[in-house]
Structures are given as structure tokens and as C-alpha cells.
Image: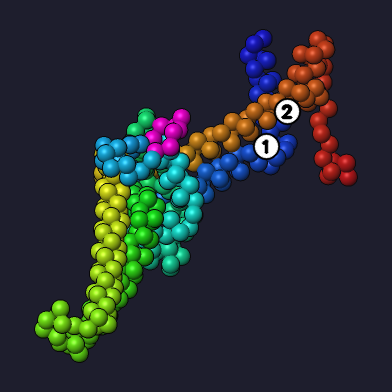
Amino acid sequence: MRSTLNRNMLLRLADTFFRRWFLYLIPFVLLAGVGGFTAARSESRFQSEGVMYVESQTLLANITKARDTPASYKSPSTLAAEQLGSLMRTDGFMKRIVKAAKVDDAVKSGLVTLAKLRSSISVGADGDHLVKVAASSTNSQTAALLVTSTIETFTSWVIEANVAESTAAKLFLDTLVDSYRTQVSTAHQTLDAFVSTNPEADVAKRSLANQIEFERLTAASNVEEARLAAAINKREDARLATEQTKSDVTQRLRLVDAPQVSALPVSSRKQAALAAVIFAMLGLLLTAGATLGATATDRSIRFASDITDRLGVPVLSIIPKARARDLG
């Protein structure tokens, strides 16, 4: 009895499928096509990773008071990862990374886009003080270069952002020092010219007018020299502040693990082919499921055995299908 039921079920499944096979094969064809297309376009990709140590405050900053660290509930690594992620969303920062990684020619030629490179680089915090930067590429050296350039570009950007004020002050003071030197030179020339035209050897025998003029010119020269010395000291302070800030940033952002050139790809064509097979199997399961569902919900009588199973009466005879030539 059980063998008869199994046979009837197989007959109904086969009949259901072949009645509308083109409909039931749609899931299999679609998923197999998607898997095959993905496998055909896939390439072997290599991944490289670098780790950066981030600190919120350094001993140098505490001693020199070069930087005030705002209070935050976020860890230093989280703040740095968020900052780097935000910068990578800008084209200007990505162009600096691309140039440092020496792939700017590929971007200019259209072989790769900034958006694709941006998506190939990932940044994340690992604990309170570590930031991981990973990059993938079809070339193992390019992946390592992207990680290195991302970390170096971020460090350079932080330095530039922190020394912007002191750098601007130094540039202004450079111009001011040049101007004061010119004024000092002019004051000296005026005083020398006065002395050369009034060569009295005995100062006591100078006229009152000459003595007053000599003292005025000497005082003016001293004032210009004092202004020049003060400007030079301020310029030195600005230069020192710049160097202190650079040293503070390099201490706060330190490379712990340099990226390595990977010898083995993280994804290959074999994996893509396996994924295509999985897609095809999934499509086959959907086709089988649709066929089983249609068969289970179909209550029509298709075979003589269906009459016996459902009605419990024997089948005495079966009228064969008439062919057109028999009717003629």
C-alpha cells in the first residue's frame, strides 16, 4: 500500500512539473544566472591591515600646555576612527590617500574610481586605544599601500589641523620681521648719515640742536631694534609651538602594526564558483518546493489510482484519449 502511495505521489509530482515546467524552472534559472554572472565578474582580492595606537593626552602636552584636550565620554580610538571615517567621505582627503598610494594614475585613467577605493578601505576601533585600518585590492601591494597611505595621510592631516594657527602666526611674523629689519636698516642709515655730516669729535662741543637730533635718531634706532628683537622672539615661540605640536601628534598617533603584503587572497574564483553552485542549488530547492506545494494543493483527479485512493471504489475501465485521426 505504501509503495502504491509513493508511486502515485511521484506520478503527480512529475505531472505537475511537466504541465508548467517553464514556470517552475524560473527560480532555478534566475538564481543560477545570478550566481554565474557573479562568478564570471569576480576577481581574486588581497587584504592588508595596519593597527594604529591612539592616545588622548601625552606627557609633552601636559608639560608644555601645547594642547587642551576636551572631555569626552568616547574612547580615543573611537574618536579617531570616527574622525578618519568622516574625512574619507570627502573627495579631497581621498585624493591625498590615492596620491600617497601611487594609484592616482589609475583614477585619472578611469580604471578605478574614488568611490570604489573608498569602499575598499575600512576603519574601526579595537578597544580604547587601537584603530584598525584594512584595505582590499586585486593587487596585494596596492592593498598594503592603501593602508599605509591612509594612516600617514590621517596623521599629516591631524598635524596640519593642530599647527594651522601657529603656522599662520609664524608666516605673519616672518613678514613682520622682514619689515622691521628694513626699518632698522633705514634708522641705522639715517643715524650714520647724520654722524658723517656732523663729525664733531668732542660730544660736549656739539650744538644743542645737533645733540638733540643725535639723541632722537639714536632712540629711534634703538626702538626699531627692540621691535625687531621682540618680533624675532615671537617668531621663535611660534616655531617652537609648531614643533611641539608635531611631536605631540606623532606621540598620540603611533603605528603599532605596519601593513604586510599578503601572499594569499581572501577571495578567489574558486570561492565565487562555489557561491554560484550554492545559488543554483537554492534555485533548485525553490523549484522543488514550488512543485511540491502545487502538487499538495491540487485536488484534481489525474490518474485512475486517484479514484481508488480518494473514493475507495475500484476502477473497472479507462477510456483512452481519442486522437484526431481516430475521430476522422
| Main SS category, magenta section | loop
- Residue sitting at x 39%, y 38%: 69
Vertical position of residue 274 compared to residue 103: above or below: above
**Which residue position holds label 1?**
24
Q: Nearer the viewer, residue 34 or 184?
A: 184
Residue 14 position in % (x across, y down): 67, 30
- Quadrant of the snapshot with the N terminus: top right
Q: Quadrant of residue 197?
A: bottom left
What number of labels is visible? 2
Does residue 111 appear left or right of residue 284 in this picture? left
Q: Is residue 109 magenta?
A: no
Q: Quadrant of residue 96?
A: bottom left
- Residue sitting at x 33%, y 61%: 170
The answer to whether mark 2 and mark 1 are in CB contact below 8 A is: yes
Residue 86 position in % (x across, y down): 48, 47
- Residue sitting at x 27%, y 39%: 63
Seen from this angle, which residue lies furthest right? 328
The numbered dot on residue 294 is: 2
Measured in 3D between alpha carbons, the distance from the residue under mark 2 to the one under mark 1, in whole angstroms, is: 10 Å
State which tag comes first along the sequence, 2 or 1.
1
Q: Quadrant of residue 267?
A: top left
Vertical position of residue 51 compared to residue 221: above or below: above
What's drawn in magenta, residue-wise?
69-76
> Mark 1 Cα within 10 Å, few/some/many (few <14, many 20+)?
many
Q: Nearer the viewer, residue 291 or 83?
A: 83
Does residue 301 appear left or right of residue 163 in this picture? right
